[in-house]
Image: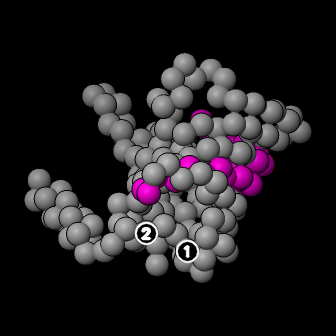
Amino acid sequence: TKRMKKLLLSLAVILSSTALTVAQKNTTMLSGTVAYTKTTDVKASYTITPLVGYFVTDKVAVGAFGDFAKVDADNKTTNVGVFARCHFMNVGKKLQVFSQLDLSSNSTTEDAVKVKSTCASLWLGANYSITKKLDLTTNLANLITYEKSEGVATTNVGFTGVANPLSATGFGLIYKF
C-alpha cells in the first residue's frame, strides 16, 4: 500500500543518513514493538510495548516500559515497570548481547475478572546496530521469572515449555539520541 511504501522510504532515508556506533553514556533510547493479529472469524488482537531508557554507562541502561495487549473485547493486559539492562558481550562490531532485569506491576482482565500481580524477570536479548542511532532488538530467552498474584507466588527458571526458544521472541526498534 501507499502508507507502507512511505514508511519504508522514510526508514531507508533514516538508515542511510547516520553512521554506525554503539550506545554511549548519557544516551537516551526509545524502543518499542507493535504486534497485530487478525484471522478469519476471530477479532483482531494487538500488543503495544513502548520503552524508554537512559545509558548511565556505556554498557548499562535503566528505564521504564509498558506492555498493553488486547486479545479480544474481554481479555486485556496492562503491564508497567522499570528495568536495568547490561550489554555484556559484543559479537563483532554490530551485535550486542544484553541481560535485562524487569520489575513490573501487571493487571489482566479476562472475562470481566481482573487479576493484579507483581513480577520480576531476568532475560537475555540482543541488539543489532544498523546505524549510529538505530538498532534492531529482540528478546531471546526469559531465564528467571518470579510472579506473585493473589497471594500465590510462582517461580519459573529457564524457558521451560518452549520447544524452540526463538518461536517466543519479540522484535523491535531502538532509536538512540
Quadrant assignment, res 27: bottom right
Contact? badges 1 and 2 (CB < 8 Å): yes
Observer able to see residue 137: no
User: Which residue is at 13% across, 59% downward?
Assistant: 5
User: Does the segment drawn in magenta span residue 112?
Assistant: yes
Q: What stretch is highlighted in magenta?
A: 93-120
User: Which residue is at 37% across, 44% downward?
Assistant: 36
Q: In this view, does 138 lie above or below 3?
A: above
Q: Depth check: 45 or 90 in front?
A: 90
Mark 1 highlights which residue? Answer: 24
Judging from the image, what secondary structure is the residue with disc 1 in? loop
Q: Distance between the residues labelled 1 and 2?
A: 9 Å
Q: Depth check: 54 or 153 in front?
A: 54
What amino acid is labelled 1 in the image? Gln
Residue 67 left/right relative to 48: right
Within 10 Å of disc 2 (Cα), the crowding (few <14, some 14-19, many 20+) is some
In the rendered picture of this protein, how many numbered marks are placed on residues?
2
Within 10 Å of disc 1 (Cα), the crowding (few <14, some 14-19, many 20+) is some
Q: Where is residue 38 in the image (x, y as percent from the top left)?
A: 32, 37
Q: In this view, does 13 lie above or below 74?
A: below
Q: Where is residue 22 in the image (x, y as percent from the top left)?
A: 48, 67
Observer able to see residue 119: yes
Q: Which mark is residue 21?
A: 2
Q: Where is residue 11 in the image (x, y as percent from the top left)?
A: 24, 65
Majority secondary structure of magenta residues? strand
What amino acid is labelled 2 in the image? Thr
